[in-house]
Image: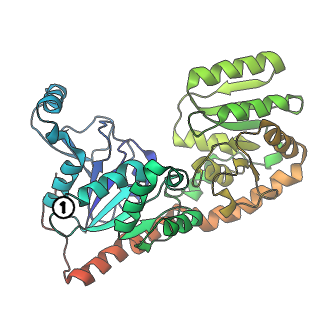
Amino acid sequence: MRVLFVGFPYSVHAARWTSLVADQGWDLHFFPSQDNDYIHPDFRNIAFWSGFSRRRPSHSHPSVRMIGFWPFETGQIVTRKLLSRLGPGWLDRPEWLAWVIRMLDPDIVHSMEFQHASYLTFAATQRSSRPFPAWIATNWGCDIQLYGRLPEHRTKIADVLRSCDYYSCECERDVRLAQQLGLRGKVLPVVPNSGGLDLQHTLSLRRPGPTAARRVIALKGYHRHMHRAQVGLRALALCADVLRDYTIRVFSPEPREIIEVQAEVITGETGLAIELMPPVSHDEMLRLHGSARISISLSLADGICTSMLEAMAMGSFPIQSNTACANEWVEDGVSAFLVPPEDPHAIADRIRQAIACDSLVNHAAGLNAATVKKRLDRSQIKRVAVEEFYQRVFAERCRRSGTHAAGQGIAGG
């Protein structure tokens, strides 16, 4: 079986998802949906269509292969600039993707994310003069929940949903939204796009003892067009009187300089201990949640927030914005608190409750552990990906075309 993924080459979610099937002996390829040279180090057994370089980045795994037309070690940047000026058609990404699909002849094209990967794949279908491979389009985060309400995106989303053969997402909410927006293809099983967690490994990173004994609060530090870390910091400042014995650890602070200034002001006014964490490994992130009493993540729109799932797995009590589909995983007021992302007073009230009630956070940890065991185990999601995504799609494609073998194009290497 030959599968061509289209997505962000730097994305840990893309790397973790493709690694679910990296040991199947399939011919896996990746076409970057953006012109970005960074390849996430978690990718395995996959060929990247870089467009230029054949040189594998030193940080990438040895099993990663590069396919490019530029045969030399140097000169890539200059050549790319010349082509963009003298022959912009050479760098037309939809045309380049369509050419790769013609040459590679994959059994399946899987676009991971809508606003870049799936829009690009739809554009490639419009440049294809032969039947297109089976196309899986995967919705990430708020790809259709938010952008489906914006006129400039609604038509593009509808084009993808009417054209793809299969649709996948991580929220039942997004199945309904996709159908309302014109989905014609089949819906694949709803599972987290991050690929789940190795639950045995996570246990080794979790602090022993009850959640109520922990004295750390974790806050997701993004504050950009959709994320609201600054609201979270303001909420923590409003209940500083009950947080004297706690350390607040802000992970992934972005933009760091803005979060840092607000944290310093709050510390000066309230005396709260606030630490901005440097970039850390995934294991260190899990250890943070495994030592936290509360984990807070706020955004205006989202799918399944990965940091919330990690908090659930590690026994931390989630306080999550009610704009995500967290309600499909937790019960508000029982196993988590779902809050308005731009109301610091409402969030502060929930923080106070989670600090005051030991039985609440301890009971929630048990409930969330059971949910995670049932729905987040990486080995179970791997089985779904292998059997209910790719093997199913491949078998249905073969039945439709009357063939039993993968395409005969370039395998890469």
Q: Position of residue 310 (x, y in %)?
A: 62, 50
Q: Identify the secondary structure beneath mark 1.
A: loop
Left or right: residue 161 compared with residue 323: left
* Residue 44, visible in the rendered structure: no
Quarter holding residue 332: bottom right
Name the residue at the front extreme: 151
- The residue lying furthest to the left in this view is 71
- Residue density around tag 1, few if under 14, some if 14–19, many if 20 or more, within 10 Å: some
Q: For this rendering, which residue is in front, 32 or 44?
A: 32
Q: Residue at x 40, y 73 (%)?
A: 185
Q: Is residue 91 visible?
A: yes
Q: Residue 133: x percent and y percent?
A: 25, 68
* Residue 15: % across, % down: 40, 50
Left/right placement of residue 151 relative to residue 347 reads left
The residue lying toward the viewer, choosing from 95 and 43, is 95
* Residue type, numbered disc 1: Ser
For the N terminus, the image quarter is: bottom left
In the image, is 267 to the left or to the right of 307? right
Look at 43% across and 67% down and name the residue there. 167
Residue 257 position (above or below residue 171): above
- Residue under numbered circle 1: 128
Nearer the observer, 391 or 348: 348
